[in-house]
Amino acid sequence: MKVSDQAVQQLRILIEQNKMQVGDRLPAERKLCEQLGVSRSSLREAIQHLASKGMLVSKAGSGTFLQQLPSNWSNHQIVEPLSGLIDQDPAYRFDVQEARSILEGGTAWYAARRATPEDMENIRRCYEQIAHYQSIGDDNQASIADAKFHLAIAEASHNLVLIQMMRGLFDLLQYNVVLGRRKVYTESHRFDQLHDQHFQVMHAIERRDPEAARNAVCGHIEFVVQQVRSIDEEDARRQRASRLNRI
């Protein structure tokens, strides 16, 4: 990773730790260099990069200001290439699910130990939004709510590195959720199963059971993987049968 890329990540963490809000001015350049342990050239390159993305804005004579909260930042350098791979070969989505199982198993475990009442309120809100949007047939919003549910669990872990990793992969997570939902949510009984799995994850976190939370979220992801594989195999069988009937 380039020094300037490291500076971008460190800036993001600094903003999070200082609980900065949109419109707040960043510390002076000299102080930032000291806090981040980077050179002025690397810092300026990082600020320029974030400004080009609309995340920061530099005003001559006034300083640099936060224009977008880090929670809304997306690591497109990671997400776009991976999304492209999934478009080219859908089998890559199973690699994403494996990565999710490893990462989210950890976030759920820590969330069960550290979640605050506010965290639980956020998790439950996302859980209820999934059901609401599903009930009115809004698949796009249901997918967003589904991804936010998993992100809310990561935020409840209060582990800054895990949170940043999940936020950085949020677009990819949502993309993966959309692909899975197109397959698994087509039948009502599967929705009921997935809805119950989300509840089990949330309930384990609420009752402060780390192992149950980790097992529930990993089991949920594995269920989706197996269901998608099964549906893919059935689709392939139908296509083969259709070709035979045309011979």
Image (cartoon, rainbow, N blue to C red):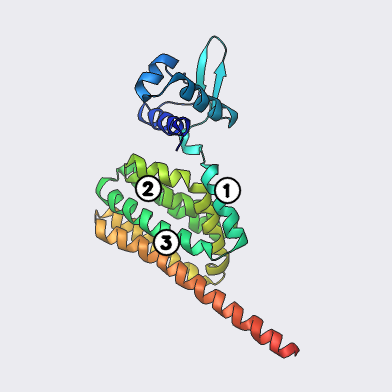
Is 210 positioned to the left or the right of 171 in the image? Answer: left
> Count the marks: how many?
3
The residues tagged by marks 1 and 2 sit, at their Cα atoms, a distance apart of 22 Å
Res. 241 visible in picture: yes
> Closer to the camera: disc 2 or disc 3?
3
The residues tagged by marks 1 and 3 sit, at their Cα atoms, a distance apart of 19 Å
Q: Quadrant of the C terminus?
A: bottom right
Q: Residue type at mark 3?
A: Glu
Where does the image place residue 128, in percent across and percent down from the top left? 45, 54
Q: Earlier in the sequence, mark 2 or mark 3?
A: 3
Q: Earlier in the sequence, mark 1 or mark 2?
A: 1
The residues tagged by marks 2 and 3 sit, at their Cα atoms, a distance apart of 17 Å
| Marker disc for residue 154 | 2
| Nearer to me, 216 or 199 | 216
Query: Contact, CB < 8 Å: mark 1 with mark 2?
Result: no
Could you say whether the residue bearing mark 2 is in a helix, strand or loop?
Answer: helix
| Marker disc for residue 134 | none
Q: Earlier in the sequence, mark 1 or mark 3?
A: 1
Where does the image place residue 193, in percent across and percent down from the top left? 43, 69
